[in-house]
Image: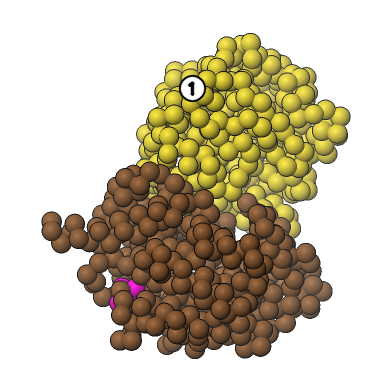
Chain colours: A yellow, B brown
Amino acid sequence: MSNIKNDLLLRVLSGEKTERVPVWMMRQAGRYLPDYIKLKEKYSFFERCQTPELATQITLQPIDQIGVDAAIIFSDILVIPQAMGLEVQMLEGKGPLLPDPIKTATDLNRLIIPNVDETLGYVFDALRLTKKELNGRVPLIGFAGAPWTILCYMVQGKGSKTFDEAKAFCYTQPELAHRLLQMITDTTIQYLKGQANAGADVIQVFDSWGGLLGPNDFENFSLQYIRQIITSLKETVPTIIFAKGAWHSLDHMAATGAQGLGIDWCITPQMARQIAGPNVTLQGNFDPAKLLSPIPVIIKEVHAMLDAFGGNHHIANLGHGILPNVPVDHARAFVDAVKEWKLNLNTA
Amino acid sequence: MSNIKNDLLLRVLSGEKTERVPVWMMRQAGRYLPDYIKLKEKYSFFERCQTPELATQITLQPIDQIGVDAAIIFSDILVIPQAMGLEVQMLEGKGPLLPDPIKTATDLNRLIIPNVDETLGYVFDALRLTKKELNGRVPLIGFAGAPWTILCYMVQGKGSKTFDEAKAFCYTQPELAHRLLQMITDTTIQYLKGQANAGADVIQVFDSWGGLLGPNDFENFSLQYIRQIITSLKETVPTIIFAKGAWHSLDHMAATGAQGLGIDWCITPQMARQIAGPNVTLQGNFDPAKLLSPIPVIIKEVHAMLDAFGGNHHIANLGHGILPNVPVDHARAFVDAVKEWKLNLNTA
C-alpha cells in the first residue's frame, strides 16, 4: 500500500478511520466524458476493451478530469461469457445481445472453462499498463459480474427489466442452473486472481440483478457463488460486493468476509448499517439521476448523504452507474462535495 | 358486505381473523388465459377496456376458471393520462407509448382535470355490469395507478427500467412535478370515488415504480399524494397500497390508514411485518416467475410463504403481475395451494 500516494480507499477498506471519505463513481470511466465519446466514435466497444492502450486511456480520464480517489479498469462484465465461448454483441444504444443464449443441457456443452491468460489476457495487459500510467496516484479497482448476473445475460440473451427467462431457467432446471453458475464461478475466480496479479488493488463483484431474487433464492442462486469468489480472494486483495437491491442480505454478504458492501439509494445508510453490522465498509449510495439536479442541490444532497453515513467506514459513490447524460461539471460537483464535506467537519 | 357470499377478502381487510387466507392474483384478468387471448386477437387493448361487456367478460374469467376470492376490474392505469388529454397507445408486445410526453410548463397546459363521468364513464359502466354478473360471488376490486407511477409514464413517454427522464424532471423542475402530481391526484380521487359508487368493494393503488425512489423522494414525490387518495376514500371503501419495492416505507404507508399493503417477493413476510407494524393486512408476495416451476414446487413454495405470513392479516397474492407465459394449471395450482393450506392447518 505504501506505493500508492492517495490510499484512502485501501485504508477505509482495511477498517481504518481516515481523514476524509474517499469517493469514486461506478461507470466513471466512459459514457458522460467528452473524451470518451470521441473514442467511442472511432472504436467499437470491444476494441475499446481489448486494446490495452485504449482501456488505459479511458480508465485514466476520470482521475485527471474529475479527481476521483480510485481508478476502475475500463472493461465489461460480459467478457466472461465471451471467454466461455458465447458470442456477445454490444449494440449501440440498445445494450448487449447474446444471439445464442443458454436454454438446455446441450447448450451448456457449448461452454468451456477457459484459460484466462489466453482469453482474457488483454484485461491483464490493460491493468498492468494502467498501473504503470497511474504511477501510484490512486488505487486501481478490478471487477467482474456476480455469477447470477452473468447467468441472467447468458440465459436471457439480452437486457431485461425482470429477467424472467433467466429466472424460469433456474426455477425449472435448477441442476442445470447450478452447473452453469459453478462454471461461471470457476472462470471468475481465475479471472479475478489474474486481475489481482496484474495489479488490481481492490476487486468489486457486481451483482446488478441480485435484487430480482427473493432472499432465499438470492442465497441459493447468487450469494453462495459470490461467497466462493470472496473466499478465494481473501488472502490476495480486498473485495467489495455490490448486489443492487439485495439489501435484505447485507448481513450475509458481510459474513462472506468482503471488506466493502455497495448499497443503492433505496435504503437509508442507517438501515443499511443496521442490517450489515458495524464493521464492514459501506459504499454508496447517491441516486444517479440526482446528478441531473442543479449543482447547489447536488452539493446539499451529497452532504446530507455523508451526514447519514457518519464519515467512517464509508466510500462515497453512486447507488448505480453514472448516467450518460450527466454534465461533466455535475460529476465533478459530486466528487468535490465529498471532498469539501470533510473540510466542513474539520472546522465544525 | 352481507350481500357477498365469499367475503373473505373484505373481512381480512377489516382486521378479522378468517377461516382461511383469501387469494387473488395481480393481472389475473387477461394475459395467460386462452379465452382472453382469443378476445385480444379480435379487439384492440382500448376496445377491451372501453367496452363494458368485454371488460366484464375478461374480469369474470379468472373467477370461473381459477377460483380466486376476488375479481379485479379489467382496465389499465393509463386511462388516467388519457382522460387528462394525453394520447396513450398500447403497442402489442412493446407496452405503452405516449407520443407527446410532458417535459415543460407549456406541456402541462395541454392537460385537463377531466369530468370523470364523461371521460371514464366506461369504467364505471364496466364495474356496474361486472357487479351484476358477479351476483355477489366475490368482492370486486377497483384500482388506479399512484400519481408518481402515472407521472413516470406521462414524462418518460414509455416503459423504462429506470425512468431516468421522469426522475430528472422531478429533480430539475420540482415545482412543475408537484403541480403535475397534484393534477393527477385530483383526477384519481374523483375517479376512485366514481369506482366505489359504481360498485367497487375495495380499491388498490398501484405504485409500480415507487421502488425507483429513495425513502425521502418516495415521501416527497409519491407517498404524500397516495396519502391524499387514501384519506379521501377512508369513509367509502377499504384500500390497498402496492408500492413495489418501497419496503422501506411500509410503516409510513400503514400510517395512511390503508387497510392493506402489497409487498413483493424481495422482502421476507417477517421483515415486512416488522416494518409495517402488527395491524395492517399484508398482501403478497409470491415471485411471479416461480409460477413457471413444476406444480409440486409451486405447492411447496406457496405453503412456505403462507407459513411465513402466519395465516392472519394476510391476502395471498403474487409479488407483481402474473406473467403471460404461465400455464393456466400453474395459476390454478397457486390458488388451490392457498386454499388447501388452511385445511392442513385445521387437521394439524
Circle 1 SS class? helix
Question: Which residue is rendered at x = 52% and y = 39% of the image?
Answer: A166
Residue A38 x, y percent position in the rendering: 86, 34
Instruction: Judge whether residue B103 can be spotted in this image.
Output: no
Could you say which is closer to the camera, residue B247 or residue B7? B7
**Quadrant where the N terminus of chain B is found in the figure:** bottom left
Question: Which residue is rendered at x = 33% and y = 82% of the image?
Answer: B4
The residue type indicated by label 1 comes to Met
Could you say which is closer to the camera, residue A303 or residue A63? A63
Taking the magenta stretch, the answer to whether it contains residue B10 is yes
Taking the magenta stretch, the answer to whether it contains residue B257 is no
Disc 1 crowd, CA 10 A, few/some/many (<14, 14-19, 20+): some
The magenta-colored residue range is B9-13
Compared with residue A276, is residue B100 higher up or lower down, i.e. above or below? Answer: below
Instruction: Judge whether residue A162 can be spotted in this image.
Output: yes
Residue B55 x, y percent position in the rendering: 55, 74
For label 1, the residue is A183
Quadrant in the picture for residue A122: top right
Residue B248 x, y percent position in the rendering: 45, 58
Quadrant in the picture for residue B344: bottom left
Quadrant in the picture for residue B190: bottom right
Residue A305 x, y percent position in the rendering: 56, 52
Compared with residue B105, is residue A178 higher up or lower down, i.e. above or below? Answer: above
Give the number of marks.
1
